[in-house]
Amino acid sequence: MRPPDEPLVTSAGDEAAIGSAGTGLPPHRLASANALFVDPTAAGQGVGAALHDVAVAAIREEGLVPVLDVVSRNTAAVRLYERRGWRLIGTGRPDWLPDEWDPVWYMTLD
């Protein structure tokens, strides 16, 4: 297991790290499920779930643990991940996130 002083994700403030989230696993055992997007006209047709399942299967085939980050205001994505068993392990504010948005969620799938 990774020592608690080795964060998986760190959220930087103006001068120092202000938060972190971890899975308890070393980084070489993790793989990010990312860039899952569905055209809004195809919403509700199972496209997102199918893409998700293929991505997770590929990660699992490599013997790795899936992790992801999701913009928390994207409630459709958050609901999909929660239905698929993802759990929240932390939140953060990446540099690209607009100040008026809620934090990004960091999640893992056991």
Image (cartoon, rainbow, N blue to C red):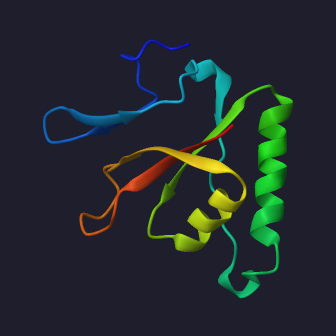
Residue 91 visible in the snapshot: yes
Which corner quadrant of the image does residue 37 belong to?
Answer: bottom right
- The location of residue 70, given as percent across then percent down, is 51, 56
Question: Which quadrant would residue 58 be assigned to in this image?
Answer: top right
Residue 51 versus residue 67 in the image, above or below = below
User: Residue at coordinates 72% horizontally, 56% vertically from top-left?
Assistant: 84
Percent coordinates x, y for residue 6 in the rendering: 41, 18
Is there any visible trace of residue 36 in the rendered image?
no
Nearer to us in this view, 41 or 85: 85
**Vertical comparison of 71 with 8: above or below:** below
Q: Is residue 72 above or below residue 59?
A: below
Q: Position of residue 74 (x, y in %)?
A: 51, 70
Q: Which residue is pictured at 46% across the width and 61% down the height?
A: 71
In the image, taking residue 11 as reference, residue 60 lies left or right, namely right
Which residue is found at the position 44% from the left and 70% from the top?
A: 73
Give the percent coordinates (x, y) of residue 38.
69, 72
Q: Quadrant of the C terminus?
A: top right
Residue shown at the point (82%, 53%) measured from the top left: 53
Q: Is residue 83 left or right of residue 88?
A: right
